[in-house]
Amino acid sequence: MTAIQFDSHGVQSFIKEHEYEELKPQLAMAQQLLFEKKGAGSDYTDWVNWASNFNQQELQKIQRLAKKVQNQSKVLVVIGIGGSYLGAKMALDFMKSPWYNDLVEDGTKIYFAGNNLSAMALQQLLQVIGDQDFSVNVISKSGQTTEAALAFRFFKQALEERYGRDGAVDRIIATTDKEKGTLREEADTAGYETLVVPDGIGGRFSVLTAVGLLPMAVAEIDIEAVLAGAEKGEENYCSTDLSKNAALQYAASRRILYDKGYTTEILASWEPSLQYFAEWWKQLMGESEGKNLKGIYPSSANYSTDLHSFGQYIQEGRRDLFETVVRVDQVASDIDVPKTPENADGLAYLEGKTLDQVNQTAADGVAIAHVDGGVPNLVVRIAKQDEETLGELIYFFEMSVAISGYLFGINPFNQPGVEAYKTAMFALLEKPGYESESQIYKNRLKNI
Amino acid sequence: MTAIQFDSHGVQSFIKEHEYEELKPQLAMAQQLLFEKKGAGSDYTDWVNWASNFNQQELQKIQRLAKKVQNQSKVLVVIGIGGSYLGAKMALDFMKSPWYNDLVEDGTKIYFAGNNLSAMALQQLLQVIGDQDFSVNVISKSGQTTEAALAFRFFKQALEERYGRDGAVDRIIATTDKEKGTLREEADTAGYETLVVPDGIGGRFSVLTAVGLLPMAVAEIDIEAVLAGAEKGEENYCSTDLSKNAALQYAASRRILYDKGYTTEILASWEPSLQYFAEWWKQLMGESEGKNLKGIYPSSANYSTDLHSFGQYIQEGRRDLFETVVRVDQVASDIDVPKTPENADGLAYLEGKTLDQVNQTAADGVAIAHVDGGVPNLVVRIAKQDEETLGELIYFFEMSVAISGYLFGINPFNQPGVEAYKTAMFALLEKPGYESESQIYKNRLKNI
């Protein structure tokens, strides 16, 4: 049984059956590169069997530290950027609510910091936290990520002012490299509790490590069930049989569409609680594929919201778009369309229906309209938003992009382009080690 | 004086000066079509001189109703979708904070509803509002927008349960057509306070009408200053002199880049408070330009957040991207990088700097890196986030897209493609009037 139904009916007028058939040798090659660890970046493929080999000691430590945070604090500040932020935020929204912090009563609120450099955002977040008791989970493999390291300075200062030096140490959990890096050294010297960012898994694949799991556990998400879902993913999405492997079907569909000029993919959903799923997906796909001057551009849309925004473009703009819609069959709780005697608004025809039925029908209608408009439409359908499904869904997309990366002939696991702006930024900031570049970039700046 | 500095240095290696020169006849034509109301969709160009002709009675009514809401309620629920939502949300974030509802103390919180069809989102929002006193501003020109009309049914029901029928009527403000439509009829029959969605301004251009101004006024944003800023926009961005008109320069740059294959534009900013500015912009641009199978695809990025997400793609993916960065020179309040004696994190080189200085330098570095990577870089620079600037900025983008639309040879003011999904949805929902299409679409659904 798979928690995911992959539905490619909406690409039938764009891809013929024999095209999948003819792509099979490439799919086999991609799977071989991945599973035999012979492909580019194979040092970063430990996520493939991660859930089924999960270290039970680490799991118990995550659970213990989550309890500790819950007992100590009304607020957990999670400091991290990119993969050290998006996975936990996505899971929190998916399993709880975008309004989790407003709705949680006895539990621990979770705020994310260190994911930007805005002075206003930082000060406002400190105000929002106010005098609530808080703990900090700082996440950085090297400890040298500027955003996270800077934010950690601010929150460490706030912790020390509030709880004293020892009290601060007792409220910090560092998720970092198991032995090296500035954060590891600081944690060992100061005596912070620590969790491990493993070596063989890149940031964008790290949501099922301590990076994502600690914040999830603090929010009372059942992380063992999430891991069990990912294990299901291992069973379902490693098959070499295209007809049985939805991740392979998704990867193949994307590759074929790209070759035909569909170079932008919109990940869309019909639930606000999946908005950050799309943000997580944008990093996973964009950072894995966008290199060597190629790759599918990852974009996102929230329906029906964005149908009244750039929906016009999707329907009638340039025909280089395709969309992948994540649909949820059963919402956790539904609500009847209210009846009114007057029918002033002309909505009487919706009475007797639930709001979710209207939402689902709108999704059906949009699929037809977009296909008619020339937008290939893929659907990733899940029965419900629960932990097992989340784990399997994460694995589904991770496996898809790994295969897709090898289909594109690139290394899906590195991110060389991220260095370019860092070099420019460090040079302009006169970071030690960048002295020779500093003047060059300062001169460049005058002419840009 | 203009509040906006448009900086096109970052496209110098992509556009030569003579290209702007050679585009001048087209720019003149586009301006003529707009100002002489001879272009397609010219019935919807009242925004051009809207601020300078603002109806003073309507302004006073907005102010009076804002005071009434503030006195009555701790919460205003703004019901609307597309242009009836994005403008107010953008302004609230821009002028106050994305955490406005957490930070406002004696004022009125503002929640947005009716911008999706999610049963979960609606129920969670009702929970978040809880037992706080609330009023409702329902915004829909026709009253027939499904999302808004449905949400209004739910909130009207909640108001009536809480305050009785008369109490509910006293807490509803309908922003709608001045004389026709279901919401106008209902408002007149029931006795709601009303404000006007004008005829000559489409939804995506409506932020400076009562649509956007009432929620702004409830949040204590000085709407007269916003309008004064837009009036400055009228002075600054109607000039026929390309060298003096930044909106014209922006429109010209976009058109030239598009013709060279840069078909996706990323609106980026370095402040979380501008994230929804990009959402507002995506509707403005995408719905205006995305038709006849062409137009620039509107995308957005939040820096530095997304540099650690699809930043890799921007740096090294397909070279059909350009970016427009909205930069804020002076943040309302800055904060020093904390000093630590140990320098465990290696950030000592940032001590003595403020957080915003780091943010600004990162922005400089990214501009260089992206240009080097082959991404044309435009900058819209504002001194600060205040009301006048907001008004002028809105006008700047509205004027740019109007000119740009005529440069593309399309009608920038209609949205024919939005009907496609509505037809499919109404047919599937068996809405009266769609009986003949109903079975056709139901059969289609089986095969999609």
Image (cartoon, coloured by chain):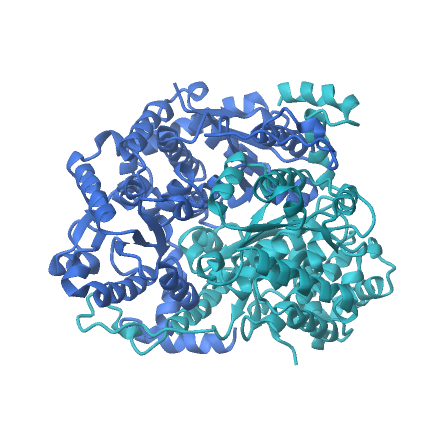
Chain colours: A cyan, B blue
Find the residue positioned furthest to the bottom: A1
Q: Write the residue at 52% across / 62% down.
A: A107
Q: Quadrant of residue A30?
A: bottom right
Count of picture labels = 0
Q: Position of residue A322 (x, y in %)?
A: 57, 58
Asked whether, in this view, residue A398 is left or right of residue B183, the answer is right
Q: Position of residue A439 (x, y in %)?
A: 73, 19
Q: Position of residue A418 (x, y in %)?
A: 71, 41
Q: Indicate whether B80 appears above or below A58.
A: above
Asked whether, in this view, residue A308 is left or right of residue B9, the answer is left
Q: Position of residue B425 (x, y in %)?
A: 39, 68
On the question of residue A331 being in view, the answer is: yes
User: Which image quarter is the N terminus of chain A in?
Assistant: bottom right
Asked whether, in this view, residue A212 is left or right of residue B97, the answer is right
User: Which image quarter is the C terminus of chain A in?
Assistant: top right
Q: Quadrant of residue B221?
A: top left
Viewer-closest of B86 and A21: B86
Q: Write the residue at 66% across / 63% down.
A: A397
Viewer-closest of A207 and A151: A151
Q: Write the residue at 61% across / 70% down.
A: A222
Asked whether, in this view, residue A357 is left or right of residue B178, the answer is right
Q: Write the residue at 77% across / 22% down.
A: A435
